[in-house]
Image (cartoon, grey):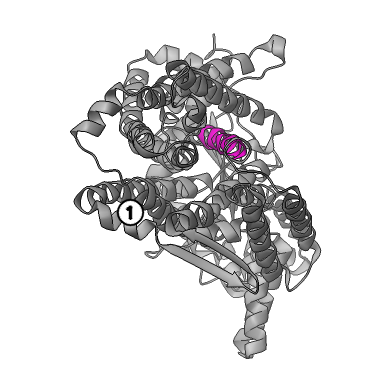
Amino acid sequence: MESATATGQASGRTAWARNLASPVRDFLSAETGGAVALIGAVVVALLWANIGPDSYDSVWSTKLSITLGGEAISHDLRTWVNEGLMTLFFLVIGLEGRRELDLGELRERRRLGIPVVAAMGGIVFAVGAYSLVNLGGEGADAWGVAMSTDTALALGTLAFVAPRWATRMRVFLLTVVVMDDLAAILVLTLAYSDKIDLTALAIAAGLFVVLGALRYVGTWRAPLAVLTSVGIWLVLSKSGIDPVVAGLAIGLVTSAYTPARGELERATAVTREFREQPTPERAVSASRTLAATISPNERVQHMLHPWTSFVIVPLFALANAGIHVDGGLLGDAIASPITLGIVAAYVLGKPLGILAASWLGTRRFLGGSRLTLTWPGLAGTAAAAGVGFTLSLLIADRSLSGELLDQAKVGVLATVLLSPLVTFGARKGIGMLPRALRVRQLGATAEQIVDLFEDVDPDRDHLRGSPDATVTLLEYGDFECPYCGQAEPTVRELLSAEGDDLSYVWRHLPLSDVHPNAQLAAEASEAAAEQGAFWEMYDRLLAHQDELTPRDLRRYADELDLDIEHFIEDLRQRRHAARVSADVASADASGVSGTPTFFVNGRRHRGDYDVKTLTRVVRAARARAAAQSPAGSA
């Protein structure tokens, strides 16, 4: 249950984090690569549409029909991509949004308020800017084109232009774009759909209720959920509502949760049974048990995210971004209210709307709360939100045609170029601000959510370094876990480099189902602690992880000049088992299921734990702690 990398270095992740792309960091990593693939697809589409316009139009207008009995669904390839495959993209967006609500920054619901208000402000200002430019013109009814930030490009822009910007900025942006997408899909459904079939809509609602009830079904839950989801999509496609709404809605109701320790231990036992008797029945049982330890949200996201980022969204770009560009089109676009309105909406309206709405959301007389990021950081995040593509093109295709549609596409593509430039300028501007101002801004932000259930107690916990240090690095570890052994030199180097500003705490999490000697080793360290030699025993246990038998433990006690008889009696009577169990209980309460797992000032660290990464995290925690202290915020 512990983490690993191909090279076996300390840059690995905990078992959970390694096997899933659930943390925001991994989601954004895929979005960054997906943004590259999307831009590449846009270039290919433009080249194809200008080199062979007839073949481009011919391919995407090819009809594809599915017939079952007397019922048939017939669309051209472009529509299948836009309404079919893109449903999976919005499903992934909904899943990640729900994961943040269940496990991430937004699990503290009051933090949801400002991003939601910011999203609405961005929409209002963007639509207002577009409508102002197109007032009374041919494109006035296409205002929906200007409202939706493209998820992949916005997150990709933020990661490319400002890779070191805090995760909070990315979480804020992710929340904004999820709400943005939800609003845009509703607009697409209500304002740009054909006549709505209320009977089909009622059937879809009923199937949605069935989908929610399937969480109580056992073995056949997954295939039934897939069939029900497909049914929802099919019914919505007949209802007059854009069926992509099904993806986002299903994603937002699919819960995420951390693997339970008991379920992980059961998975280990079932896998061991398969190893002893490798029969097809035990193989199926092991596979199902392993899958059941991970929430459906993260299982589906892990399976679909690479496909949506690297195949589906680029395919959408290939199908929709191809326009025949010539001097006439560019000349018309430059003067077109539609093109200018889209550019003004995204480059000016969207960022200004996010900033203005966030300001309102922080006003105490309106019941507002503090921002989770600084105002300069919010400005950079808002700039990254000024890019349209996916839903913009979907709505443009519904509301415009001919030359007007091409002009809208030129405007949307222009935002793809302008948004990174504006974001880059914002990053440079932030870097030029006086350090004192940045520190004051950091001190004014909301406190970090504490993930650690039980606070560090210097009188109880095993602490290395100064108890008055600004930053505390806490590790839940297992003395037999090889990755804890690989992390130990990193921790030692970090303690040496950071001096009295860093303290280190070890808590026990022996994974006895995979490490038979881990529990006894943990109790041996506590027996040594009773004689004032915890850290000396800690060093020996991690240095000799393959030698943790009772005889080995006695030898280490002898080398440390401990009272051997007392030490052996402690182990025989299991006098320190309760102390180890208390650490395990605190790990369970903190949602820890693998080793090593680190917490920095009570905040869970996800991802790599090499020296460079942990140094950056520790120093960021120190800066935040200093900024939020009375002296730092004065």
Above-or-below relation of 167 to 368: below
Q: Give how far across and how far down residue 247 sits, in percent.
A: 60, 52
Quadrant including the C terminus: top right
Q: Give how far across and how far down residue 509 sits, in percent.
A: 65, 57
- Specify the quadrant of the image occupied by residue 327: top left
At mark 1, the secondary structure is helix
Q: Give how far across and how far down residue 136 sits, in percent.
A: 47, 18
Question: Could you tell whether 462 is left or right of 41 in the image?
Answer: right
Q: Nearer the viewer, residue 341 or 90?
A: 341
| Chain part drawn in magenta | 171-187
Quadrant including the N terminus: bottom right
Q: Nearer the viewer, residue 280 or 609?
A: 280
**Within-10-Å neighbours for mark 1: few <14, some 14–19, many 20+:** some
- Callout 1, which amino acid? Asp
Residue at (41% x, 58% y) in the render:
311
Instruction: Determine the main secondary structure of the stretch shown in magenta.
Output: helix
**Residue 144 seen in this snapshot:** yes
Residue at (67% x, 67% y) in the render:
227
Q: Give how far across and how far down residue 169 sits, in percent.
A: 49, 31
- Specify the quadrant of the image occupied by residue 537: bottom right
Above-or-below relation of 86 to 266: above
Residue at (62% x, 29% y) in the render:
116
Above-or-below relation of 587 to 163: below
